C-alpha cells in the first residue's frame, strides 16, 4: 500500500514538471555560444559545421601558456606551453594532429586529435574555446578544463 501511494505521488509530481525540451530551449547553451552571444543572451547564428581541410583558424593559433613563465622562460622548461598552428598542437612532450575538426561557433571548435609522445599514441576529443577577446584558450583534457593565456608576440 505504501509503495502504491509513493508511486502515485511520483507520477503526480512528474506531471507537474515542464518537458525538458521546453526548459532547454529557454536559454542558450553556454558551451556553444560565442562571447557576444553569451553577453546578449542571443543564440549563435552559425550552425556547427565540419572544417573539411582540418585547419585551425588563425584566431586560435599562437603560443599559449598555463602560467606566465611558460611564455617567458629561456631554460626549455615551459611544461605548460601549448603551440597551436594550422594543423597541429604541440606540447612539452607530445604533439597532436587533427583528425576531425568542427566549428561550433567562431570561438568554439570541437576537435578530435591524434596524440603522440613519450612512445605512446592516443586519440582524444578536445573542445577548444576562445574567450576574453581571444586572449584565453581553454581545452578539455582527461575531463579537466585547462585555461591557457596567449603569450605576447
Image: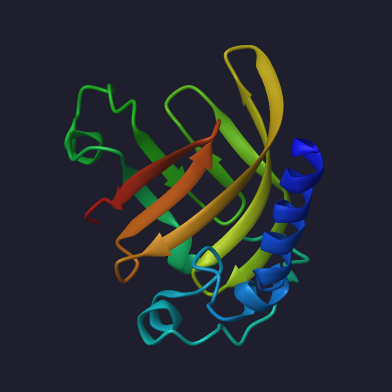
In this rendering, would 103 be left or right of 136?
right
Q: Is residue 150 above or below residue 114?
A: below
Q: Does residue 137 lie above or below 140 as drawn?
A: below
Give the residue displayed 23% in from the left and 41% down from the top: 71
Name the residue at 63% across, 83% down: 46
State the image quarter where residue 39 is shown.
bottom left
Can residue 56 be seen in the rendering of this structure? no
Snapshot colouring: rainbow
Image quadrant containing the N terminus: top right
Q: At x 70% / y 26%, what residue is drawn?
A: 122
Q: Is residue 54 left or right of residue 133?
A: right
Residue 64 spot, x, y in % from top left: 34, 47
Seen in the image, is 27 located left or right of residue 50?
left
| Point 43% across, 84% down: residue | 41
- The reply to whether residue 41 is visible in this rendering is yes
Residue 65, position as x, y percentages in the image: 30, 41
Q: Residue furthest front?
A: 1
Q: Position of residue 89 (x, y in %)?
A: 53, 43
Choose top left, top right, bottom left or bottom right for residue 70.
top left
The quarter of the displayed image where residue 103 is located: bottom right
| Quadrant position of the C terminus in the picture | bottom left
Q: Nearer the viewer, residue 54 or 14?
A: 14
Q: How many marks?
A: 0
73 sits to left or right of 53: left
Residue 15 locus on image (x, y percent):
73, 68
Amino acid at each position: 500500500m505504501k509503495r502504491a501511494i509513493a508511486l502515485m505521488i511520483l507520477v503526480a509530481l512528474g506531471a507537474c514538471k515542464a518537458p525538458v525540451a521546453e526548459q532547454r530551449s529557454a536559454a542558450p547553451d553556454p558551451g556553444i555560444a560565442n562571447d557576444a552571444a553569451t553577453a546578449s543572451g542571443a543564440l549563435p547564428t552559425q550552425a556547427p559545421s565540419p572544417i573539411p581541410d582540418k585547419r585551425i583558424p588563425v584566431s586560435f593559433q599562437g603560443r599559449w601558456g598555463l602560467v606566465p613563465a611558460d611564455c617567458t622562460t629561456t631554460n626549455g622548461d615551459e611544461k605548460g606551453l601549448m603551440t597551436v598552428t594550422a594543423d597541429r598542437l604541440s606540447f612539452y612532450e607530445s604533439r597532436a594532429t587533427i583528425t576531425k575538426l568542427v566549428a561550433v561557433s567562431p570561438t568554439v571548435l570541437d576537435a578530435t586529435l591524434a596524440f603522440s609522445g613519450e612512445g605512446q599514441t592516443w586519440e582524444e576529443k578536445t573542445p577548444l574555446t576562445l574567450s576574453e577577446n581571444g586572449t584565453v584558450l581553454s581545452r578539455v583534457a582527461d575531463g579537466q578544463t585547462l585555461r591557457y593565456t596567449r603569450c605576447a608576440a
